[in-house]
Image: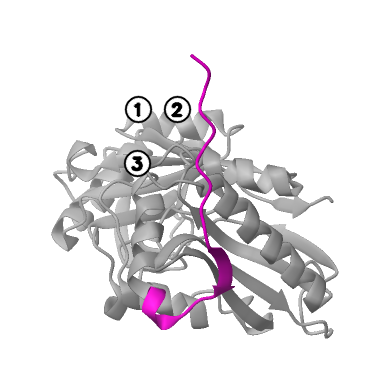
Amino acid sequence: MSAQPEPALTALEVRPFHRDDRDQLTDLINAHVAAVVPGVSVSVNTVLSQLQRQPDEFIVDPWVAERLTLVAGHRHGVVAAAHLLRYRTDAAVGECYRGAGGIEWFVCHPPASFRPGAREAADLLMSACLAQFVRWKVTSRYADGALPAPGVYGLPEPWPHIRAAYERAGFVHDGDTEIVLIADVADLPPRPAGPSDPAGLSVRRTLGECGTRFTAHPPPTAGRDTRIAGFIEVDTVLDRAERRPRGGGLADIGNLHVAEEYRDTGLTTWLLGHAAHWLRLAGSDRLLAYASPDESDRIRELTAHGFCELTRTARGWHHRP
């Protein structure tokens, strides 16, 4: 039996986002988020806030000159949506962003969904995005999938329909691939029983660059008080409090470092035990970590402590007409 062609949408239009679209747009975004990170969703307020600015991107966001959100709609339904950015051209803007235009994210229903003509809607919306770049006279075009949810960036593997839409439009992946891992906090090492490890290392909790830091210090008697044996940083605030998503029990490892001389001492297990105890007190039940495919030692170490691969995401997409 031959395959039946996908029914076409009638009265399909691409137009700027209207505030009345907010609930359907949020549902479409959450469907994509849920396919990447389990149990996470974002609020309407979070989506609307990101359309106006990205406060967490305190370096790059001020370089944005214009923002535009487009939706592909059928009657009163939102079938696809995209958020576009145009960066300023002055010298204060980073060179790789200067004059560029970007698809910050692109979401659409997959062709096999109950929405007829989903592929047609995606291609029509993508054509509108490229036409907007022409009107903006951008010097380069990039694409990403950075939705306002933790762990969702680049083009994750669970979105083959988005990748296909990008490739049909002439975008190519010329960047890196990152692995996102996840662990159940309950499966992480237990809190160490004593204040120091068998090697005499003590732990100190401070504010780090990427969250709460647990630092292992050599014993003072060793005459190395200023040295650091290793540290781990965990971020339990992956979104601002007023925009907290469902799945607020999610945290991530911002940094994990163990000095070479302590690699075989079990220090990683000890640090993870301290961090896991803190995460349990904070009500975090899942922990994300990140690695590149060539970091085999890091991946092996994380999986040995309860992590598993959640997805791989392709970063760095540029338009090659």
Q: What stretch is highlighted in magenta?
A: 1-21
The residue lying toward the viewer, choosing from 17 and 95, is 17
Q: Is residue 284 left or right of residue 315?
A: left
Residue type at mark 2: give it.
Answer: Arg
Indicate the quadrant where residue 104 lies: bottom right
Q: Residue at x 58, y 39 (%)?
A: 292
- Front one among 80 and 308: 80
Q: Does the magenta stretch include residue 136?
A: no
Marks 1 & 2, CB-CB < 8 Å contact: yes
- Label 3, secondary structure: give it: strand
Kindly identify which residue carries mark 3.
Answer: 182
Q: Which of marks 2 and 3 is nearer the N terminus?
A: 3
Q: Which residue is drawn at 53% across and 47% down?
A: 8
Residue 187 in the figure: left or right of residue 61: left
Q: How far apart are marks 1 and 2 (CA)?
A: 6 Å
- Callout 3 touching callout 1 (CB < 8 Å): no
- Lower sequence index among marks 3 and 1: 3
Query: Which sits in the foreground, 60 or 49?
Result: 49
Residue drawn 63% across and 49% down?
A: 315
Mark 2 — residue?
300
Question: Which residue type carries mark 1?
Answer: Ala
Query: Residue 125's spot in the image, x, y percent?
Result: 61, 60
Residue 55 in sight in this render: no
Residue 136 % position (x, y): 78, 77
Residue at 55% from the left image edge and 56% from the top image edge = 145
| Kind of residue at disc 3 | Ile
Q: Position of residue 210 (x, y in %)?
A: 44, 64
Camera-nearest residue between 276 and 215: 276
Eye-nearest disc, 3 or 1: 3
Q: Which mark is residue 304?
A: 1
